[in-house]
Amino acid sequence: MSRMRKIISQRLTASASQVPHIYLFSEVDATALLSRRADLSHRIEEETHQRLSYNDLLIEAVARCIERYPLFNATLEGNLIVIPAEIHIGLAVAIEDGLIVPVIK
């Protein structure tokens, strides 16, 4: 196992045992998401030379939900619920040797 994979394994194990997890499964109508991507794709590609992905739009949607419901972004520090002023979202990305999680601020 490479050093990176070993660290990934340790951190995922720690996360799973130290952080409460919530799992929600739901079916959604993504028609508006598909339409938004179609509307924005051409302009985004012209301006950035990058393809607009569904992940891009889902990250935006998550950020907007956190703005509306800030407790989703809260942490517990002792007996205090702390809600950060900023929203930062990490997205796991597979690379050849393992996994990285760039943070979108």
Image (cartoon, grey):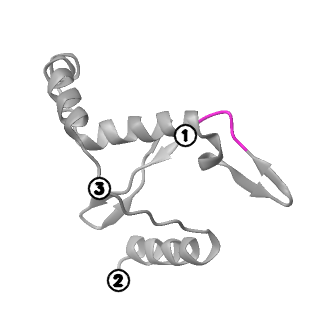
Q: Residues within 10 Å of mark 1 (few under 14, many from 20)?
A: some
Q: Which mark is residue 66?
A: 1
Q: Which amino acid type corresponds to the residue marked 3 in the rendered image?
A: Glu
Q: Which residues are magenta?
A: 83-87
Q: Nearer the viewer, mark 2 or mark 1?
A: 1
Please provide percent x and percent y for residue 47: 21, 16
Please provide percent x and percent y for residue 4: 40, 70
| Quadrant of the rendered image containing residue 14 | bottom right
Circle count: 3
Q: Which amino acid type corresponds to the residue marked 2 in the rendered image?
A: Met
Please provide percent x and percent y for residue 73: 61, 47
- Which image quadrant: the N terminus? bottom left
C-alpha separation, residue under disc 3 versus residue under disc 2? 37 Å
Left or right side of 18 for 38: left
Vertical arrangement, residue 4 with respect to residue 81, above or below: below
Give the farthest residue toward the right.
Answer: 79
Vertical arrangement, residue 17 with respect to residue 74, above or below: below
Please provide percent x and percent y for residue 52: 21, 33
Q: Which mark is residue 1?
A: 2
Query: Disc 1 on helix, strand or loop?
Result: helix
Which of 95/86 is in front? 86
Q: Which amino acid type corresponds to the residue marked 1 in the rendered image?
A: Ile
Residue bearing the label numbered 3: 27
Q: Main secondary structure of the magenta part?
A: loop
Q: Which numbered disc flags the more N-terminal residue, 2 or 1? A: 2
Q: Residue at x 52, y 65 (%)?
A: 22
- In magenta stretch: residue 14: no
Q: Which mark is residue 99?
A: none
Vertical arrangement, residue 17 with respect to residue 45, above or below: below
Q: Nearer the viewer, mark 3 or mark 1?
A: 3
C-alpha separation, residue under disc 3 versus residue under disc 1? 20 Å
